[in-house]
Amino acid sequence: MAEKIVVIGTGYVGLPLAVMLARSGYRVVGVDIEENVVNAINEGVLRLAEKDVKKIFNEPQVRKNLHAQKTPCPADVFIISVPTPLDEKKRVADLSQVVSAVESVMPHLRSGNLVIVESTVPPLTCRNVIAPLIEKTGLKVGKDIFLCHCPERILPGEIFEEIVHNDRVIGGRDGRAAEMAREIYASFVRGNLYVTDDITAELVKLMENAYRDVNIALANEFAAVAEGLGVDVLKAIELADKHPRVNILKPGIGTGGHCIPVDPWFIKEVDPINSRLIHTARLINDEVPRKIAAKIRRALKDIKDPGIVALGVTYKPDTPDTRNSPALEIIRRLKEDGYRVVAYDPVAEGYGYSSIKEVARDADCLVVLVEHAAIRKELAKGEAGIKKAMRHPIVLRFYSESTES
């Protein structure tokens, strides 16, 4: 039975996992290359804006069982939980951090160890990349070392709820690996645990996010068509959704976060011929920030050297996460075109403000890019006063319940 677990990578995914494992009684070592991250964990400081996880992090059992350091050490189980970003030029998975993580644990592997990959990877990565690396140690995967892919399913802002209650997929390279991993996750997961093989598990995670990406692209394409026809797309969607088998998503300013803008490319990487719809959806959603920036430029075409205040820089409402944020992409495009843009956000670190009225004073345009609850509330109460404080009372909102300008 496993007693000691090493988690490589203590970010949004790895650290909550380490906390839950420590709470379950395992001795857990969180490994991170950033010394300030290691020190924060050991000093009892959780650098995640997650109230429930923070509460658990401070429990005596967790503080006793969780330790952080910069390098791996011997253990029973090694969990790889590092980012797999997109190579922006080649549009393929950058597996360098995954490879480095596996290489870092190789000197510590012993017969009977379990290696779990939580990082999102293209199909066949466990078999064609990770297993050959492990076997360079002389240990045989499936005989000496057991390998499993257990893709994470979490959402920033709701990590505790998701990591505990979501169903999980356990993709074992063989049956014994799957059972060993299942025992680990059963210690804290209250959702169902579904056992399958590693390739299926790798594909499942990508399918989940490609499904969402395609449906978002459909909504964004409907929005473009409706605009050309002079139709209110939100009203059209509301009526279309009256059909008992139709549920169209709401269009937006683009897709962001650590999964949806990235994962579908991994499917195209392994099978470009049979992923044309997935590829097209990616192109559609990647175009949306450019279209939104163009709308803003058109609204300001008659104003010389306009000053723009942008509200919201995160990738979605009510989370501080700015990874792959379409709002930041829109702001970048406007600045590249020479516009004076100042960005504010009530939840993102470094973008705070006193009130919308104050930051919008003497501005020519207020652009609401992310509809945080705090922004919606202040605009609902005082939009008229905010407009009076502006040099030109132009307020732009996109696909919001309130779109008056």
Image (cartoon, helix red, strand yellow):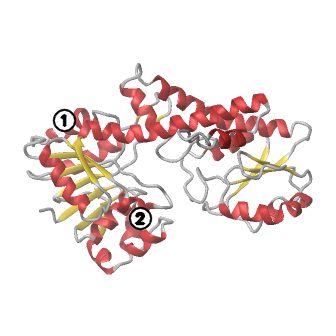
User: Label 1 crowding class (10 Å Cα cut-off): few <14, some 14-19, many 20+?
Assistant: few
Q: Is 239 located above or below residue 49 in the figure?
A: above
Q: Amino acid at mark 2?
A: Phe
- x%, y% of residue 258? 48, 47
Q: Amino acid at mark 1?
A: Pro
Q: Is 155 located above or below residue 288 in the figure?
A: below
Measured Cα–Cα span from mark 2 to mark 1: 34 Å
Query: Label 1's element?
Result: helix
| Residue shown at the point (39%, 56%) measured from the top left | 13
User: 87 or 100: which is nearer to us?
Assistant: 87
User: 80 or 260: which is nearer to us?
Assistant: 260
- x%, y% of residue 334? 74, 40
Kindly tell me whether residue 101 is visible in this rendering: yes
| Residue shown at the point (8%, 46%) measured from the top left | 144
Q: Does residue 145 appear left or right of residue 45 in this picture?
A: left
- x%, y% of residue 327? 65, 46
Q: Is 70 located above or below residue 290 in the figure?
A: below
In the picture of the structure, the residue carrying the numbered disc 2 is: 160
Residue 297 picture quarter: top right
Q: On residue 132, which mark appears? A: 1
